[in-house]
Amino acid sequence: MKDERLASQSKIQNPKSKIQNAAPFLKWAGGKQRLLAQYQDYFPPRHTVRRYFEPFIGGAAVFFHYQFPRATLSDKNDKLIEAYRMVQQNVDGVIRALQPHRNDADYFYAVRAQNPADLSPAERAARLIYLNKICYNGLYRENSRGEFNVPFGRYKNPTICHESRLRAAARALQGARLLAADFEETVADAQEGDFVYFDPPYAPLSATSSFTSYSKDGFTVADQKRLAAVVADLTARDCRVMLSNSSAPLVYELYDGRPPYRLIKIQARRNINSKANKRGPVKELLIINY
Ligand SMILES: C[S@@+](CC[C@H](N)C(=O)[O-])C[C@H]1O[C@@H](n2cnc3c(N)ncnc32)[C@H](O)[C@@H]1O
C-alpha cells in the first residue's frame, strides 16, 4: 500500500516522460517525498536546467523524482554518500549483502555493533540500509565516537531488501557525481543555467522543539547564516536556487523582504517526532530566487 502511494506520488506532474520512476530507498529525517506535490509548481522545467546540484541529499526524494540532468549530489554524512556510491556502482553486491539481514532485535544489535571498517564497501552500504530500515523511526544518529546508536524499531514486517527500488535508484544515479562534502564546497563552481536545491537541517522553531542533529554536529545558526550568504552569492551568479526551511523567525530574517527571493508557505506533516501528538501539520517555507 505504502509502495503504491509512493509510486503514485512519483507520477505527480510529468517532468520526465522518458525517465523511469525511482524513489528513496532510505527513510530520512526531513525526507521530501510527501511534499513533492506542493513543490511541483515551483521547480524549473527540466529541459531548462543545465546542471543540478543537491548539497543536502539525505534520502534524495527530490533527485529521484525529477532526475535532473548532470547532477551533483552531496551530503556531509560520508557513510551515506558511500552507500549511494555502492548502489550506483555495485547494486548487485549491495542486494546480495542485504539478503541475509533479518528483522530481529538481537541480530540488529549484533549488526549495529560491527566495526564498519571490517566490512567490504558493499557490506557497509547494506549495513547502513539495513539499520536504517529497522531502527527506531529511520533516524540516523551517532554517538561521540561516530558509532550509529539508534535502537531497534520493532516493525512488524519491514522490507529490508527492496530489490526493485534499489535497482531503480541505481539507474537514476548513473552519471551523478556523489560527494561527501559541506554544502558550500559542493556549489563552489555552480554557474548561470545551473539549478541548486538546498534542503538543510531546519532552523529550530524554538530552541527545544528542534531536530537539528543529523550526525555528530548539528547545523547551527551560524550555518544557516552561511547558507544564506551562499544563496546570495549563487543569486549574483545567475544560478536558480530553491531552498526548503522551517518557518522560524531566523528564516524570515534571512530571506524575507529581499528581492528576488519569494517565500512560499507549505503545509507539512512532521514524521520524526517521538511524541505522536507532535506529528501534526506544521508550516514550512520554500524559498526561490526566480
Ligand atoms: C533535511 S536532510 C535532507 C533531506 C532530503 N532532502 C530528503 O528528501 O531526504 C538534511 C541533510 O543535511 C546533511 N547535512 C548537515 N549539515 C551539512 C553540511 N554542513 N553540509 C552538507 N550536508 C549537511 C545531513 O547529513 C542530512 O542528510
Image (cartoon, rainbow, N blue to C red):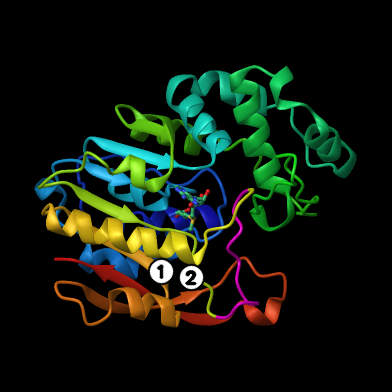
Residue underneath mark 2: 203
Callout 1: SS: strand
Taking 14 as reference, is 128 left or right?
A: right
Q: What residue type is labelled 2?
A: Ala
Where residue 214 sits: x, y (%)? 59, 54
Residue sticking out furthest to the right = 106
Q: Are marks 1 and 2 in contact (CB under 8 Å)?
A: yes
At label 1, counting other C-alpha atoms closer than 10 Å, the crowd grade (few under 14, some 14-19, many 20 or more) is many
Q: Which of marks 1 and 2 is in front?
A: 2
The range drawn in magenta is: 206-215
Instruction: Give percent across and percent down for residue 245.
Output: 41, 69
Magenta segment's dominant SS is loop
Quadrant for the N terminus, please.
Answer: bottom right
Task: Tell me the residue at 63%/30% (across/down).
Answer: 126
Q: Which amino acid does label 1 sit on?
A: Asn
Label 2 crowd (10 A; few <14 / some 14-19 / many >=20)? many
Q: How far apart are marks 1 and 2 (CA)?
A: 7 Å
Instruction: Report whether residue 136 is seen.
Output: yes
Q: 233 above or below 52?
A: below
Q: Does the magenta stretch include residue 214?
A: yes
Q: Which residue is drawn at 51% across and 61% down?
A: 30
Q: Nearer the viewer, residue 43 or 213?
A: 213
